[in-house]
Image: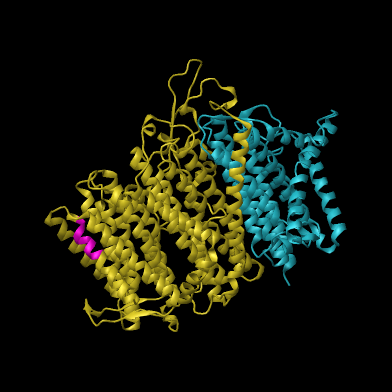
Amino acid sequence: MTPGGLLGIAGIGLTAGILGAFKAPRLWLAATLTGAAAAFAAAVWALATGPVWDWQPGFVIGGEALHLRLDGLSAFFLLLLSVLGGAGTLYAAEYWADRDHPVSAPSARAWWNGLLLSMGGVLLCANGLHFLIGWEIFTVCAYFLITTERQRPAARAAGWLYLAASHVAMVCLFAFFALLAARTGGWELGPMGDRPGLAPLFWLALVGFGLKAGLFPLHIWLPSAHANAPSHVSAILSGMAIKLGIYGLVRFTGWLPVPDSAGWVVALLGVVSAVLGVAFALGQHDLKRLLAYHSVENIGIILIGLGFAMIAAAQGQAAWGRLALAGALLHIWNHGLFKALLFLGAGSVVHATGTREMSRLGGLWRALPWTASLFALAATAIAGLPPLNGFVSEWLVYLGLFDAVSAHGTAAYAAIPAAVALGLTGALALACFVKVCGVVFLGLPRTPISRHVHECGWRMRLPMLGLGAACVAIGLAPVLFWPALVSAADAWQPGWVDDASSTPLATLGSFHLALAGLVILAAVLLWRRVKQNGIRRAGTWDCGYAAPAPRMQYTAGSFAGIITGWFDWILRPVRHAHLPKDNFPARADFAEHTPETVLERVIEPAGSLVQRLSLAVRRLQDGRVQAYILYLLLGLAALAILAVMGGPR
Amino acid sequence: MIAVLELFLRLAAWLLLAPLLPGIINRVKSWVAGRRGPPVLQLYYDLARLWRKGIVLSTAVSPAHIAGPALAWVALVGAALLLPVGQAGATLSFRGDALLFVYLLAFARFCLALAALDTGSAFAGMGVAREVSYAVLAEAAIITALLTLCVQSNSVSLVTMLAPSAGAGAALLAAGLFGVLLAENCRVPFDDPNTHLELTMIHEAMVLDHSGPPLAAILHGAALKLLLFAVLLTEAVLPLGKLSLLPALAALAGSVLLVAVIAGLVESLMARLAFRRVPLLLTTAFVLCVFALLVAWKGGMP
């Protein structure tokens, strides 16, 4: 079957799902899963066989002929979309079931399908106008999904912020596409590398797509939106929706000429996003908000790779540029997989305990063994540790940076700080996920809520298992996925990525495979030895303290305290402390909260300044005719003075 | 067949020699203090005894408590196989193995940290928080050191990176890496392996609740990590690539011994730093590595 047929099935399946969403949840499930599977098959077909699928049926929508195209790059993103869409669909069937959410579940299902359809449409559109239409539908669908629980004020506020930020991005994209159409004389999209006059448009695209991708400091909408959406929505938002911003950047930096400084700016934004994203994540106490900040971090890693690929393209340095590009592309997949898994795991925790507050959780591994192990797997992957997939893509980016350094060119001046920042980011992410796993899943329950919980059912577990398996597969056999990377990279810069650069990847894969086998073997052997020697059970020794209580365990805040202290200058944590004083201290307490600095210290003050200025200006209009006549006279006088002083020569 | 034999020989060398270093450091310390001190082979006896002992398992712990030390130990052994030994090369060498080396150490840290948090002990939490926080700065320093070697040798593979000397910046790089060695292996002035006060510990606080074979795995892994860092430091600084096989091995062994003696002297002559000063010292190590990088960059320019 051709990709056209498969994509047709996908479209029909998702549309049928919308119809079935309200009355027939089973039909919705079957139709949506079929659609996702068909899209998956089409993407695999396109990545494996190579030729670009191009379809111009002759329909006219909005005055422009419909034109769909599936090349390596769109197929690369479509594959991720179909995997995450399928996983999220199955997960939602249990997580957001009619039984628990009779009002919101049907509409959430319909919007979900709308979101998948419109995101797929954006990936396929080869016409600027249709791209914009698809983009707007996708934005609106995501808004209704974020506000699924709109009875909660926090969800409404998050949705509103998201909508406002998205439409700022939309304005930039309108301008971008309109100027592009005006200068090229049509809305058709395609490679236009031979028109250097288009280069300044890149800055519009950077703001428009960057806002969607959530790069620092344009990430303001991201934490609250991800935290307040249902978890399967957070998973697709973080795994796929923000990647569409990256798709836009990759697509148009590949097709259009870019200014000379573009690569440097993208790399700089990447470094800033990576380091500050993880720093903000460390300050969070809300499980899903924390994961959302890690999206900022990972978008940063992707942008470091993309930025250096752009620098390399500008300087004609394919040798290291292709490694950076391959790393960035693979990290798009990897982040989609492990971040979706983390959000689904967080959803399972929320489903079981009803709270996202980490300091109220603890010891959940007993009740949620599947969730805990899969979450730990994803945490290992996102911290960029071998032998999982996160390391493979970060390693490729590192290789690109190190090769840029040893090439001794101008790019090395940027590559050296970027490599150090990437190392910092990795170590900070490790600290952050040790904190999350330790506080949420290990130790003892901190409050009674986490004592009576139960593991999620198979429909929530299966998608998580699938995503975990994908993370392991990319980690252990990265070379299998190399052709897909080549296919996507070819769409960006034809002929850049060759098979030779995959050689160290194959060695790395076999090392990972051996490592994975050996760690399992070692754990089994050690466990057998321990059992053979005999085990006595007792309370945690804790240096002989007689009455340890679960509340005495280290908390998330105190764990991250050292590092958040280093980042005080940007995190600006708000602390409320009543410390114990005197010989007979009264009740003491301490609370710490890390606000969204950019939003609360920059955007909101700027907004209120505009509001105050507008109010001041409004005083001019006080309803008295005398005043208006005065304004008229003043205006006339000004004109007269202007005419006399600076009259035409 | 020969390859397998060689692999086992190398493994045996790494695993058997590792526990010697802490013994040497302790011997130096006792010598400076005028004590008789424990035998050099004390850690071997300890490991053998721990391996035979039963364990006391906290009721709070998950399987990660046992799996963590096993995973960490394997990761450290894997890192040892990537590190070249003088002229004999490494068991496995490929482009980019230097980064794999760094991340294997990070993986070991991750596993031990989770195994420690598993007990729910506040002391363990404190130790882990310090360990992972200070590791951030150490990681920046070690990546900078790798960049220095990369600039010098135009390579990202440990075998070629470590063959020449670090050139004019060798002293700077040695000082920086020595700081990282002390921090990552929890030696004075960053951490005191012999302190009796849990509140001021880093690494020891993490393993307070471990016993028996898992503790043996942790202790052996820690000794191996110390040896790894000592070998890395030596090879980064000395031009072992210019010597032939046996002299290179002898020079390597001698310098690793020297590193251990210096670590012992530092431990005898200095007090542990206050915790708020630890980041400063680590930043100093990082800055030393940056200067080594600048020197290498200037020297590498045509």
B286 displayed left or right of A649: right
A408 displayed left or right of B85: left
> Which of A249 and B81 lies nearest the eye of the viewer?
B81
Residue drawn at 28 percent across, 48 percent down: A96
How far across and how far down the image is residue A179, in percent? 33, 76
How far across and how far down the image is residue A16, in percent? 22, 64
> Which of B15 and B119 lies nearest the eye of the viewer?
B15
How far across and how far down the image is residue A547, in percent? 51, 21
The answer, for residue B166, to whether it is visible in the render is yes
> Which of B54 and A630 lies nearest the eye of the viewer?
B54
Magenta stretch: give its range. Answer: A14-21
**On the image, which quarter does residue A120 sit in?**
bottom left
Q: Which chain is rendered cyan in the image?
A: B
Residue drawn at 56 percent across, 71 percent down: A321
Q: Is residue A365 magenta?
A: no
Q: Residue lying furthest left in this view?
A: A625
Q: Which chain is rendered yellow in the image?
A: A
A190 lies above or below B7: below
